[in-house]
Amino acid sequence: MPIVPLASFAGSSIDHLVSLGRACETAYNLRRHYGFATAYPFDWWISTTEGAARFIRDGDAEALYRQEDLSVSADGDAVGNARYGIRLQHEFPRDRRLEGRPVVADWADHLEAPRKRTAHLARRFFGLAATARNIVFVRAIAPRDTNGAAVAALLEALDMRFTAARVAVVLVNYRGQVPAAHPVHRLSVARPAGADWRGDSGAWDAALATLGLRMTPGLHKPATAADLSAHVAARSGLDAEDPGPAFEGASPAAKMS
């Protein structure tokens, strides 16, 4: 089924509200505003629109961890996948002994835990294609990003993967062109100077309220204050002393149903 106008969900509930990035801010505010705790792959990455489209099109979570495509960013802050344009911001241990707490030098020895976690979330994400009646995908766009070709690729990938569900797409702060065949909903969310990674909760609440969406009751674990606190805590990433299982346990994405 092709992407439908968001207005077609008026008067009905939606089963799944899914962040497609581009960073943690989107997922955090969707969970906070709508009160659900279910996690999906893009919740913790910093991704380009092209990379998001390629990941959805390929549908291969394992490919994200091919070591030949991975490298540490110049600032030492994260490991990124060059093929997918995805920065794995919170998936590898950090060295608390060094200034800035960069990713540990032996990060390549710590692939298994994030690989397993992403495989779990990817199964949930791609599994929606067979189980969901309706889905609203939300992606925030960088302020200066007007890459219409990348947006078109993303919409085509969603069309290809989620043919059995009714799908609507919300693009936050996107000012570029959208293919005429895709009825995308645009949403503006103000981001005042000095806002941290969460953005401005009041601005998000005001903008999301205009969508008129409500979640189908009983499909998702309700978000608690502890869930949202864990989301904030996970921003600090791992320390070199932490074992792999602690990462999975500390990550709300791994815990949420």
Image (cartoon, rainbow, N blue to C red):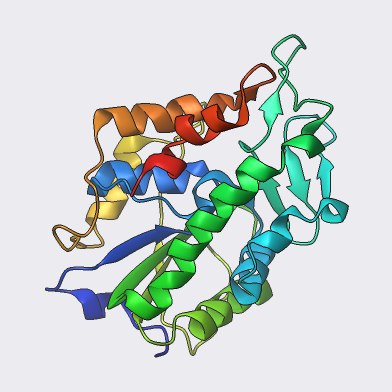
Asked whether the viewer can see residue 173, the reply is: no
> Would you place residue 217 above or below residue 230 in this image?
below
> Would you place residue 223 above or below residue 75 in this image?
below
Q: Quadrant of the N terminus?
A: bottom left
Residue at (13, 59) in percent of width and height? 217
Residue 231 location in percent, x, y?
42, 33
Residue 167 location in percent, x, y?
37, 78
> Would you place residue 246 above or below residue 1 in this image?
above
Residue 103 location in percent, x, y?
75, 28
Residue at (62, 76) in percent of width and height? 57
Asked whether the viewer can see residue 46, the reply is: yes
* Residue 104 relative to residue 150: left or right: right
In the image shown, does 9 or 72 lie closer to the viewer?
Answer: 72
* Residue 4 relative to residue 76: left or right: left
Examine the image and state in which quarter residue 10 appears: bottom left
Residue 168 location in percent, x, y?
37, 75
Examine the image and state in which quarter residue 214 appears: bottom left
Q: Residue furthest right?
A: 68
In the image shown, does 252 or 213 lie closer to the viewer?
Answer: 252
> Would you place residue 99 above or below residue 178 in this image?
above
Residue at (65, 68) in percent of width and height? 60
Q: Residue furthest top?
A: 97
What is the count of numbered marks? 0
